[in-house]
Amino acid sequence: MTQFVADVGLRIRLMRLARGMTQKDLAERADISRLTLMSIEAGSLGSRFADVARLLWAMDDVSLQTALATAAQDPAYQDAVRGNLPRFKSRRKDFA
């Protein structure tokens, strides 16, 4: 998990730099603080998903948009949308 978060932070940093944006520019565009952006780029585990999503959308990250669109093709996702899944998963173990 730690490596994944660090990789996401690095990707955001590299995407920002490739677009010629400063931290201030991107933070303002994503409507988050510069300190929050710095924390995300550093790979902080305390980062909120919503803030990461704001950054990716602010940079118009096509891969994120594609990943979300592709999720609609996942059979488990389709079952959930059709309402074929239980509202919650029981923690109780069934013993036969």
Image (cartoon, rainbow, N blue to C red):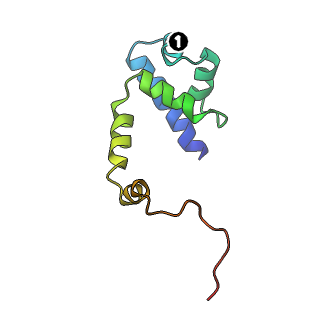
Q: Residue at x 51, y 37 (%)?
A: 7
Residue 69 sits in which quadrant? Answer: top left
Residue 5 sits in which quadrant? Answer: top right
60 relative position to 32: left or right? left
Residue 96 sits in which quadrant? Answer: bottom right
22 relative position to 66: left or right? right
- Residue 52: give x, y in percent of width and height: 53, 30
Q: Residue at x 56, y 28 (%)?
A: 51
- Residue 34: give x, y in percent of width and height: 60, 15
Q: Residue at x 63, y 26 (%)?
A: 39
Residue 75 sits above or below residue 93 on the image: above
- Residue 10: give x, y in percent of width and height: 50, 30
Judged from the image, the secondary structure of the residue bearing numbered disc 1 is: helix
Residue 24 sits above or below residue 80 on the image: above
Q: Which residue is mark 1?
A: 28
Residue 82 sits above or below residue 59 on the image: below
Q: How many marks?
A: 1
Q: Residue at x 59, y 47 (%)?
A: 1
Farthest bottom residue in view: 96
Q: Nearer the viewer, residue 89 or 82?
A: 82
Q: Nearer the viewer, residue 39 or 52?
A: 52
Residue 79 sits above or below residue 60 on the image: below
- Give the amino acid at mark 1: Glu
1 relative position to 73: left or right? right
**Label 1 Cα neighbours within 10 Å, binned few <14 / some 14-19 / many ≥20:** some
- Residue 88: give x, y in percent of width and height: 59, 61
